[in-house]
Image: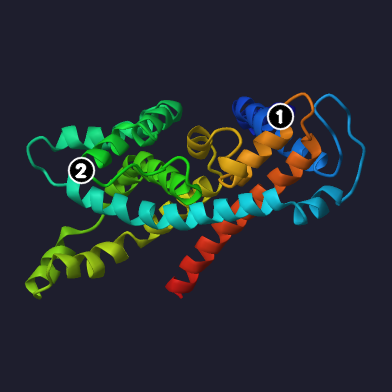
């Protein structure tokens, strides 16, 4: 009886051997940094100085930090400006490119190109376009409108960064919608057309309900990505976040506070915990709203 028992134990242990590399990578690059950040958020640790436990002092300081509230405001505005566009526009784009017409493959590839392009390259291109002496302002001056401070005005800079985020994410979410649209029965559209429904009515009454779960997924993914935005604003506003830091986002504040030889790692960790908490709350809020609609 010993041999079958030993074989059974080996079969039970074998799956863990296959899972071990992935678990080690996850533990080393995800779990350990998360636990370390959580622990550091309760200390006054700096880059080259071991920290001591200070309890909730870092979180109490957050409440009186004007830059924290500025970063929270900008990150929230980013979510409000980006998410609706990334939920609706990729769906319309997917409906456009799913048609089998000559040359449609080229357009599908062209729309997806920004997704695979480096965000640094994309950001520098847009900075060149929107600079005070860039191509866009030169064209505006040519037609008599005058130059616009896309990168110097606080709100225009945020709007410009949102435009870059939407432009870069269109192709990615378009692919997700294309997969969802492929599962929508053609008979539903044909039946709606027979009943006299026009294209807009068919879109609202057939397409949208059929891909609603995908729209929720896109809303959740884009909400988290928008709240954690860093590269677009950093490249367009600079490390300081524009004049007086008015365009700083929460993740930019984390980077600026926690890096350097005198970086406040403990305080930056507390900021990171807030970012993590808000992103989880956003995910739960979107999922809960979807469940309420289903009910």
Left or right placement of residue 61 versus residue 209 in this view: right
Left or right placement of residue 247 versus residue 1 in this view: left
Please tell me in which quadrant of the rendered image residue 208 appears. bottom left
Please tell me in which quadrant of the rendered image residue 63 appears. bottom right
Q: Residue at x 59, y 55 (%)?
A: 73
Numbered mark located on residue 259 in the image? 1
Numbered mark located on residue 295 in the image? none
Q: Which of the image's four quarters has the N terminus?
A: top right
Residue on which disc 2 sits: 143
Q: Is residue 289 visible?
A: yes
Here the colouring is: rainbow
Q: Callout 2: helix, strand or loop?
A: loop
Label 2 packing within 10 angstroms: few (<14), some (14-19), many (20+)? few
Q: Callout 1: helix, strand or loop?
A: loop
Q: Which badge, 2 or 1, is on the more N-terminal residue?
A: 2
Left or right placement of residue 234 versus residue 123 in this view: right
Q: Taking 197 as reference, is 9 above or below it? A: above
**Where is residue 178 drawn, in percent x and y?**
27, 47
Label 2 and label 1: CA atoms lie apart by 45 Å
């Amino acid at each position: 009886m010993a041999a079958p028992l030993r074989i059974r134990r080996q079969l039970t242990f074998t799956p863990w051997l296959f899972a071990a590399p992935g678990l080690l990578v996850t533990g080393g690059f995800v779990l350990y940094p998360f636990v370390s950040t959580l622990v550091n958020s309760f200390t006054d640790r700096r880059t080259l100085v071991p920290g001591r436990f200070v309890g909730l002092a870092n979180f109490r300081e957050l409440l009186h930090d004007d830059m924290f509230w500025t970063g929270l405001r900008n990150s929230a505005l980013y979510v409000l400006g980006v998410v609706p566009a990334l939920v609706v526009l990729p769906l319309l784009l997917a409906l456009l490119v799913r048609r089998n017409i000559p040359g449609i493959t080229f357009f599908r590839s062209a729309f997806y190109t920004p997704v695979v392009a480096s965000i640094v390259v994309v950001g520098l291109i847009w900075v060149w376009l929107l600079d005070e002496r860039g191509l866009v302002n030169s064209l505006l001056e040519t037609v008599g409108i005058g130059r616009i401070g896309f990168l110097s005005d606080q709100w225009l800079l945020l709007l410009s960064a949102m435009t870059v985020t939407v432009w870069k994410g269109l192709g990615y979410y378009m692919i997700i919608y294309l997969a969802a649209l492929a599962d929508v029965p053609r008979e539903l559209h044909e039946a709606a057309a027979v009943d006299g429904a026009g294209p807009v009515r068919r879109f609202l009454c057939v397409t949208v309900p059929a891909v609603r779960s995908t729209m929720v997924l896109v809303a959740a993914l884009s909400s988290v990505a928008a709240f954690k935005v860093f590269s677009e604003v950093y490249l367009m506003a600079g490390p300081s976040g524009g004049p007086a830091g008015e365009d700083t986002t929460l993740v930019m504040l984390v980077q600026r506070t926690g890096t350097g030889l005198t970086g406040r790692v403990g305080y930056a960790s507390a900021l990171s915990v807030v970012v993590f908490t808000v992103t989880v709350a956003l995910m739960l809020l979107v999922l809960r709203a979807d469940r309420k609609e289903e009910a």
